[in-house]
Image (cartoon, rainbow, N blue to C red):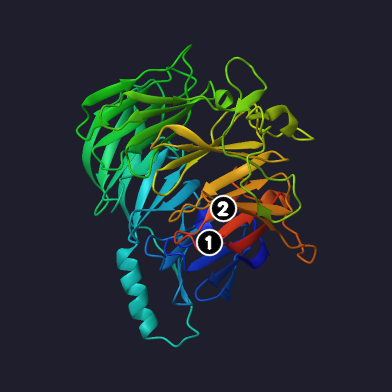
Amino acid sequence: MSISQIINSSIISKNNFSPNGKYLLVPKGKNLILYTLHPDIKKLEKIIFNSTINYIEFSPSSEYFLILLLKLQECHIKSVNKKNFLMKIKEPIYNINSAIWSSNDNYILISLNNYNALHIFSTKDEYENIEEELDNQNLDYKYNKNFKFVISNIKFPNLSTQGIDFSCGAREFFAIIIRKQIKDWVEIYDTSDYSLVSSFVCSTINADNILWTKDNSFILVQENKNYDCKLFVYSLSGNLIHIIEPYKNYLGINKLNISPNGHYITATYCDNNIRLYHYLSFKLCKEIFPDNLIIPSNNNKYIFEKTVILVENSKKDEINFEHLFDKKKKLFNIENTFPKKISNNQNNTLSNFSYSFNSQYLAFISIKFPHILLIYDITAFKLSFLIVFENNIIDFIWSPCSLQLVICTENEEKIYFFQPQRAKAFKLPENNNINNNINEKEKNKTEKNLFFSSDGKRVLYKNNKYTFFLIEPGNDI
């Protein structure tokens, strides 16, 4: 386990990593630095723009990356391998709101505020033209191309980031919620040419989330939790298959996800509990009550013997898997573990949960006990681990390809790595030599603090000073 780099960045997200895990983008105000990560981290290029960078994203092939400059109303496309390759989409009168890559490198989706529309820009012909011209020029030639080739114009889209979703796997289809005729509609497009495949009216009042099932057989449409709080399941042709009703007192869903193996639709509700639904029958198969898993419903302050890991009661880096309870009573006093200081920044809703890559474990926290991480075995429907920290938990994430869980707390001196048979506390180096001169307005606010590369070899950790640590955890802790 080692620290590869300590860097300041104004944007910290999963988009910093390329999809193939080989490259890293680090924006800082108007500057953008491209790093290669294989075999070792190395700076490839530094690009300076005329305005603050608001968004970055690698293309699906990792050959290009997109840079959005909202102040200038520009969307730039840069090549990873060809230093002088640069294109630009400029729409000053349309008021660009956001931009994302499609399922391949040939299309970019740009939402426009003034026209309440989503434009699909084709870049395929532009790539070919630019590469041909570059081949005929010397290495100092810099190509800066303004282009506008709209192949499709989707009107009245839901501009929420959850209002669009690509199908799983090859991402051959694109689904979007739109609002027309005072109703919610779902439109499905073929991503090879963005031709309309299907369109149907939803039974929702104000839908704000859409999600494909893992086998691409169904589309889930979530009602806004401030309205009817229902979850609707549709076939691709628009047939209503099932309705998941609100639990009690019209308590809506905070977060909706599907397990990596596709077997369970997982929802955290406004009552701060988790419910699992089977993806074929859409019936409730398990309710998880985090608070009751820690303290039983009889309000006894003791819990019966479980695998309890008390992290910060030792100064050692190694976390021992000892059962920290009274061996005579076989009980553990949870009251002795409360943090010395309760943070005022804690969210009062349960919205953060994370599946292991093989869908065996589900990690989440309790709202009453924000310093305790619960790891639930989905295959056996039982609690496997309670990890108790001295400080409140800020974020946690599973590796995309191993049973390794990374956890960060309000103690920014350490980061924690957990595996079912072993755990370790990793002390972060002092970063006083890093000059943090990022303007507050340039910081891209995000709720997440931890991000894994797609190959699981590196993890980004962001502290509250917007310094991020690039950590290589290795295969074993």
The residue lying at 50 percent from left, 63 percent from top is 475
Circle 1 packing at 10 Å, graded few (<14), some (14-19), many (20+), is few
Which is more toward the observer, 353 or 222? 353
Q: Residue visible at 26% across and 44% down?
A: 189
Q: Tell me the amino acid under the disc marked 1.
A: Asp
The numbered disc on residue 307 is none
Quarter of image, res 351: top right
Quarter containing the C terminus: bottom right
- CB atoms of marks 1 and 2 within 8 Å: yes
Residue 230 position within the rendered picture, expressed as x and y whole percent measured from the top left: 39, 21
Q: In which quarter of the image is the N terminus?
A: bottom right
User: Where's residue 58, x and y in %?
Assistant: 45, 61
Q: Mark 2 points at which residue?
A: 422
Which residue type carries mark 2?
A: Arg
Q: Look at the numbered disc 2 and give the secondary structure of its residue.
A: strand
Residue beneath label 1, please? 476
Name the one closer to the observer, 181 or 294: 294
Residue lying at the far front of the rendered structure: 328
Q: Position of residue 78 (x, y in %)?
A: 47, 68
Name the foreground residue: 128 vs 467.
467
Of labels 1 and 2, earlier in sequence is 2
